[in-house]
Image (spheres, rainbow, N blue to C red):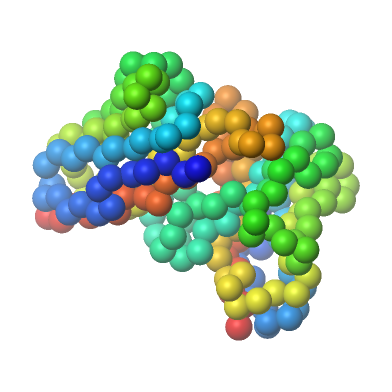
Amino acid sequence: QQPVQSPQAVILREGEDAVINCSSSKALYSVHWYRQKHGEAPVFLMILLKGGEQKGHEKISASFNEKKQQSSLYLTASQLSYSGTYFCGTEGYSGAGSYQLTFGKGTKLSVIP
Amino acid sequence: EPEVTQTPSHQVTQMGQEVILRCVPISNHLYFYWYRQILGQKVEFLVSFYNNEISEKSEIFDDQFSVERPDGSNFTLKIRSTKLEDSAMYFCAQPLARWYFGPGTRLTVT
């Protein structure tokens, strides 16, 4: 079952902050965050493995609450280059016994001057 | 940084034709995956390949699709008789320390 992302879209002015949320109804082994520009492959941002873990990547950070099966991506002081679609991917075992990375529908972020 | 590579970057084909998409993994890791993304939609799981066999496949991966490892290292995704709705970006991926995605092949079926 795919994770649920919110919001679906957000428009920011340069310098503003945003939070993108990702939740799952299944137990999670890890959460992965990607950013995708139009026509390109998803670019890996970060992976979170442990409950309550937080990570940072430039001005982009994320948290993972394993018990709540939720993750949030925090973008601070946004730049024009942050524009794109952000996907969370949740890693877990499928019903057939193999493990998969399942993506949410994405959050389209537009940063305007 | 290691890379997964894919060829071709873009393929245009007519409905009903066969296409073969190719991927070179980073290493001979046991797990290998194919994903698909229709324009404007999310990235969807197609099939996983473990130890030279299909491990799991989604409902998208019907009898028109097949995966092979023709020379023991590279992977191929074949669509036997393409349909208009097969138009999408196709990504191969490998889970190592983190998941590595190839740059994708844009398939356009006309």
Count numbered badges in the picture: 0
Is B1 or B88 nearer to us in this picture? B88
- Residue B31: image location, x then y, percent: 71, 35
Expressed as whole percent of the image width and height from the top left, the position of residue B78 reads 76, 62
Position of residue A82 relative to residue A65, above or below, is below
Q: Residue B36, located in which quarter of the rendered image?
A: bottom right
Q: Is residue B62 above or below residue A6?
A: below
Q: Look at 82% across and 34% down and name the residue there.
A: B51
Looking at the image, residue A91 sits to the left or right of residue B59; the answer is left
Q: Is residue B88 visible?
A: yes
Question: Is residue A32 rendered to the left or right of residue B33?
Answer: left
Q: With respect to residue B31, does B8 lie above or below?
A: below
Q: Is residue A100 left or right of residue A103?
A: right
Q: Position of residue B14 (x, y in %)?
A: 68, 82
Tell me the residue at 55%/30% (across/down).
Answer: A92
The residue shown at (56%, 35%) is B99
Given residues B98 and B5, the one toward you in this image is B98
Looking at the rendering, in which quadrant would you find the C terminus of chain A? Answer: bottom left
Say which quarter of the image contains residue A9: bottom left
Asked if one can make out residue B3 in the rendered structure from this viewpoint, the answer is no
Residue B26 lies, with reference to residue B76, above or below; the image says above
Task: Tell which residue pokes out farthest to the right in this image.
Answer: B71
Q: Nearer the viewer, residue B24 or A88?
A: A88
A93 left or right of A47? Answer: right
Residue drawn at (18%, 40%) of the image:
A18
